[in-house]
Image (cartoon, rainbow, N blue to C red):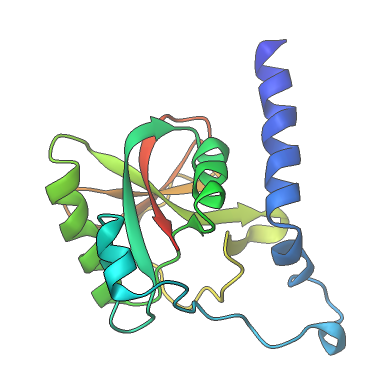
Amino acid sequence: MAKLFFALIFTVGIIASTNAVAIRFSNDVSTIGPEPTPSPTISSAACADLNGVKSHSTGQCFIHVNETKTFIQAELHCESLNGHLTSIHSGFDNLLVADFAREIFPSIDQYYVGLTRFEGNNDAWQDGTRVDYTDYGYQNYGQLCTTVIMNDATWTRTDCFTQAYFVCSV
């Protein structure tokens, strides 16, 4: 009963926090606007004040959170910082986030990023940006959330109820 309750809460949370993303998968492309792109919302100095690292290519401020949460709890935490679980749009940013994670989380094996899978095998970033880069080393089919494996920076699908560290973008 408890698992059913948490599954329901998780589903409602995903739908509520990604409603705009779900709309992007509509078949009526005439009503869909341009794809959002990550945009810098804080200065480099403000990012540094948050112990974050700034992407030179997208302007995103990556903040590594040193506590474990489920995927939806992590997304809600990032939203409280006026951001989302991070989206990654290049191999360089993937390595930037992973290298910085190794410094912040030296003893962990994985951390969440904001990529989820919806019905119809459509992937979506929590921030609504276009999925233009992935780095799956192993896809655990049937799982809906994505973590980055620390030892080689490849991605894997993970059970969304897994407690993991995470990275926010603001």
Task: Please state which of residues 165 and 155 is positioned toward the viewer in this rendering.
Answer: 165
Q: Classify residue 123 by image quadrant.
A: bottom right
Where residue 109 appears, as percent x and y from the top left, is 23, 38
Farthest top residue? Answer: 1
Could you tell me which quadrant the N terminus lies in? top right
Could you tell me which quadrant the C terminus lies in? bottom left
Task: Please state which of residues 82 and 97 is positioned toward the viewer in this rendering.
Answer: 82
Q: Classify residue 162 by image quadrant.
A: top left
Look at the picture and state if 9 lies above or below 130: above
Residue name at image x 56 percent, y 54 percent: 116
Where residue 125 appears, as percent x and y from the top left, is 55, 63
157 left or right of 96 in image: right
159 left or right of 149 in image: right
Residue name at image x 16 percent, y 59 percent: 99
Where residue 28 appears, as percent x and y from the top left, is 87, 81
Q: Classify residue 13 by image quadrant.
A: top right
Where residue 145 appears, as percent x and y from the top left, is 51, 46
166 left or right of 81 in image: left
86 left or right of 103 in image: right
Q: Is residue 136 visible?
A: no
Look at the picture and state if 111 lies above or below 99: above
Task: Please state which of residues 61 and 158 is positioned toward the viewer in this rendering.
Answer: 61
